[in-house]
Image: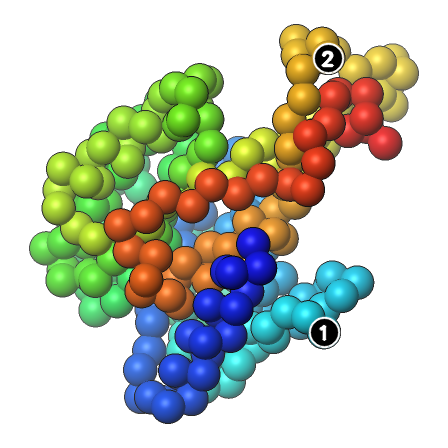
Amino acid sequence: MGTVWNDTKHSLQMFRKNPGFAIAAIFALALGIGANSAIFSVVNAVLLKPLSYPNADRMVNFLVPLERGIRPRVLTRSAEKALSLFGDRVDAYVGDLAVPTSLGAAIQGANIVFLVNVGPEIPERDRAAAIISKDSRVQRIVKLSSLDVEQGLAIGAWHEKGEAAIRDVGIPFTFVRPTGFMSNLLAWAHPIRTEGVVRSSTADGRRPFIHSDDIASVCVAALLREEYTGRSLPITGPESLIASSAIN
């Protein structure tokens, strides 16, 4: 991931040389703990306030793009909710990925679309967003996908078809493929609190869970760096954990 941080620093240097350049990223607010956590991290933890990492001095302060007039857009089902979360620091457009006709106004005039979809409708919704983006002359789509695509497992099968749909449309793309979201483990909170147990089908299987802030940082780097066009970026946490270790 060190390469991503270095590339991001270079991107911000390019912004300084071209202050008139702006990227309008459409952040698709979707259901699901993982999706919501990642999107909120992209806009809030990365774009709207300084990073809260212990070693934040080693990372880029992404307030710089906002200070230079690079203003993101947010696609949301609720303008009031977007206003309460982000204030006047983003342009909010009301729409729903399930209703393609509601996407046009938000996408029109954008340079890059950041696409997040969940559920079995991922392929159809990804295709619809890609078609509208291409017709609107969007330069590139950055899709939050899943590392499970590489095995075709679980939601990976849906994301695999979504990635294929975007490729078929013919719009430039970058696919960010994180492993399991650490924030998804919050689903264990209730059984731990009420029963003192965690139920998992993985037994001693290991997975390198990743924090949503790290996913957000990579997504922002993918939005800023054109050289990631046409690439799939697999990202993981620092250590593969079994369920009992992940609890700690």
Q: Residues within 10 Å of mark 1 (few under 14, many from 20)?
A: few
User: At numbered mark 1, what does the secondary structure look like: helix, strand or loop?
Assistant: helix
Residue in front for this viewpoint, 124 or 5: 5
Query: What is the quadrant of the C terminus in the image?
Result: top right
In the image, what residue type sits under mark 2? Asp
Residue 29 % position (x, y):
44, 47
In the image, what residue type sits under mark 1? Asp
Is 147 left or right of 247, judged from the image as shown? Answer: left
User: At numbered mark 2, what does the secondary structure look like: helix, strand or loop?
Assistant: loop
Q: Quadrant of residue 74?
A: bottom left
Residue 35 % position (x, y):
51, 40
- Is the residue 228 above or below the residue 239 in the image? below
Q: Which mark is residue 239?
A: none
Q: CA distance from mark 1 to mark 2?
A: 37 Å
Query: What is the quadrant of the N terminus in the image?
Result: bottom right
Residue in front for this viewpoint, 119 or 64: 64
Residue picked out by circle 2: 204
Q: Quadrant of residue 167?
A: top left
Q: How is the image coloured?
A: rainbow
Tag 1 and tag 2, C-beta contact below 8 Å? no
Residue depicted at 69% across the width and 30% down the height: 240
Q: Quadrant of residue 60?
A: bottom right
Number of marks in picture: 2
Residue picked out by circle 1: 57
Residue 245 % position (x, y):
81, 26
Nearer-N-terminus badge (1/2): 1
